[in-house]
Structures are given as C-alpha cells and as structure tokens.
Image (cartoon, helix red, strand yellow):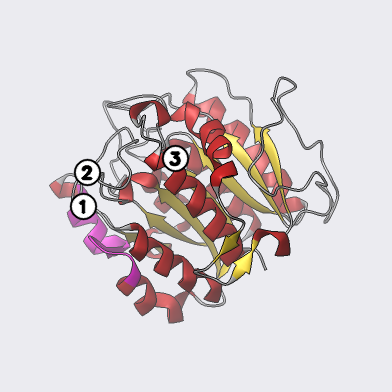
C-alpha cells in the first residue's frame, strides 16, 4: 500500500455504525484511525475485555469535544473509527497476527493507529507493526503490571508476557515503563536491570525522560489498570495504589512534545463496572490522547 492510499475502512459488515464521538466518515482524509481489538483469550482473572472497544465508543457520546486541559477541540483534528478488527476466537497467535497486519496497513497509509482493547496481548500486533515501520521505535508502557514474564503457565503469548515480547523485538533499553506496582520479584529485578523502569508514578518520571525521547518515534500502550481501582474498577486485574486521573491528564499534556506514531488503550472490562466510571474515564483518555498526539 502506498503512502496516503485508502483501504476498506470497516472490517466487520455487522458493525452497528456506533463510532467514537466526532469521528469523520472520510477514511482518506483522516489523520488517525481508531480500531477495536476485541480480544480476551489469555485473561488470567476476570474476563470481558473484548467488550471494551464497543462500550468506550458508546459512552463517548457523553463527552464534550473540547478539552480544557489542552485547550483543543476534536473538531480541529480528523480521525476515522474503523470498527473492530475480526479476530479468531480463542487463538492468541492468529489474533496478534491479524492486528499486526491491520496496523501495518495504517502505517503504510500514513495514519496514526489508535487501538482499543481488549486484553494487553492485543497490543503486541500493532507494536510489532510500529517497529517494522520505525526501526528506531521507543515504547511507553503505562500499566499496573510489569508484563515481563518469560511465559505464563507455559504460554509465551499472554497478557502477562506482552512487554517481554516487545523487549525481544526492539531491545529492553527502548522500553519505558511507568506506574508499575505489581509483578514477581524476578520481573522487578529484570526490569530494573534492563528496561527504563519507573514504578509507582507517571507524570514526574515521564517529564524527566522527555529529553531522551524527543525526536524518536514513540508508541504509547496504556493499560487502564494503571489507575487506582477507586477511579477505574472495570478491569480484570485491578491493583490498589494506582495513579489518579489528574496525574494522567497532566502526563498526556507532556506527550505533545513527543513524536507519537501509534497508541492503544487496553484492559477495559465494562461488565465489571456497572457504574460506567471506568468506561467514561477510558473515553476521556481517548479524547485527550487524540488531541495531544494528532498534529
């Protein structure tokens, strides 16, 4: 696919037409493309993240299009919502491959891919595609968990191993981890020795490393469970002691200084949170990330 060439925008013929608020209907003119990664094949505690992408879109209708944090409006950018990528139920390897192929078409078309998950393993496909498109890639991993296991219950492809697989592809020194507060002793030791590891916080350490990230292509993978469950209980493996939305929105403002080439937001399980607080927070994050990262 050549630069700027449009591809068939909607993958699922049964897709209801529900899109993220403010999305354009013109794929060719879009700067960014939102797409769903409805996958929860390896979730180890409470399943249901495959329902996340649809519900994030549905609750987005309650948002204002204007961000007072960034003084920017969604009407100032152009983004397309492609619906959910169809994935082979229960097959992690083929699902990662399908997401890799789709994200690759977006990079080739000159779009900024923005995936909505789905379990965190879904992020591996688009991150690998980003590494193919940008050999100098850096990955910002914002999460409660290290996700650095070599395998989980004998499986190398798992939401508990996804960042270890990323490290193998681009090198651990190019992986920046923020907000981490859960993992094995071995994972924490490995992270401290190998990745750029900043546990328990997001804003201050991100601000400290901006200088070394500027100019490099950056992929941001954001797990909703980085938040304290007081703010986002709707996730499969909630961990107390997390960050606040205020810290998150301040950190997103810092991303305006970076060359973000791809993003995803994962691990929203709407059926766990009947209050809808998690889904509403996720939708607001999507708005802020779009406004910060789409030029």
| 3 vs 2, front mark | 3
In percent of the image, x 59 and y 24: which residue is there? 87
Left or right: 54 in relation to 133? left
| Disc 3 packing (10 Å; few <14; some 14–19; many ≥20) | many
The vertical placement of 236 against 206, above or below, is: above
Q: Is residue 35 or residue 123 the one in the foreground?
A: 35
**Sequence-earlier tag: 1 or 3:** 1
Tell me where residue 36 appears, x and y as whole percent. 59, 36
In percent of the image, x 19 and y 46: which residue is there? 240
Q: Secondary structure at mark 2?
A: loop
Q: Secondary structure at mark 1?
A: loop
Residue behind mark 2? 239
Q: Can residue 242 be seen by looking at this rendering? A: yes
In percent of the image, x 25 and y 46: which residue is there? 230
Tell me where residue 171 appears, x and y as whole percent. 42, 59
Left or right: 279 in relation to 53? left
Residue behind mark 1? 181
**Magenta region:** 187-203
Q: Is residue 251 or residue 159 the one in the foreground?
A: 251
| Disc 2 packing (10 Å; few <14; some 14–19; many ≥20) | some
Q: Residue 199 colored magenta? A: yes
Q: Are the residues flagged by discs 1 and 2 in contact, CB closer than 8 Å?
A: yes
The vertical placement of 55 against 207, above or below, is: above
| 1 vs 2, front mark | 2
Residue behind mark 3? 279
């Amino acid at each position: 696919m050549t630069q700027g060439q449009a591809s068939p925008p909607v993958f699922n013929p049964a897709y209801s037409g529900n899109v993220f608020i403010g999305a354009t209907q013109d794929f060719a003119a879009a700067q960014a493309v939102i797409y769903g990664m409805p996958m929860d094949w390896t979730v180890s505690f409470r399943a249901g993240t495959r329902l996340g992408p649809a519900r994030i879109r549905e609750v987005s209708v309650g948002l204002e299009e204007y961000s007072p944090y960034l003084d920017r409006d969604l009407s100032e950018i152009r983004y397309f919502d492609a619906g959910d990528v169809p994935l082979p139920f229960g097959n992690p390897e083929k699902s990662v491959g399908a997401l890799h192929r789709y994200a690759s078409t977006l990079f080739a078309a000159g779009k900024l891919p923005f995936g909505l998950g789905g379990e965190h393993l879904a992020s591996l496909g688009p991150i690998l595609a980003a590494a193919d498109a940008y050999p100098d890639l850096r990955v910002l991993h914002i999460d409660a968990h290290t996700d650095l296991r070599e395998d989980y219950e004998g499986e190398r492809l798992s939401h508990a191993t996804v960042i270890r697989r990323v490290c193998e592809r681009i090198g651990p020194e190019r992986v920046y981890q923020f907000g981490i507060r859960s993992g094995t002793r071995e994972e924490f030791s490995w992270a401290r020795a190998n990745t750029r590891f900043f546990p328990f916080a997001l804003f201050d350490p991100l601000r400290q490393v901006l200088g070394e990230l500027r100019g490099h292509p950056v992929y941001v993978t954001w797990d909703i469970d980085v938040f304290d469950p007081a703010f986002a209980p709707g996730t499969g493996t909630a961990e107390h002691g997390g960050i606040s939305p205020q810290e998150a929105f301040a950190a997103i403002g810092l991303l305006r200084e970076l060359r973000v080439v791809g993003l995803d937001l994962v691990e929203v399980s709407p059926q766990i949170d009947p209050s809808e607080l998690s889904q509403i927070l996720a939708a607001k994050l999507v708005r802020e990330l779009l406004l910060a990262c789409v030029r």
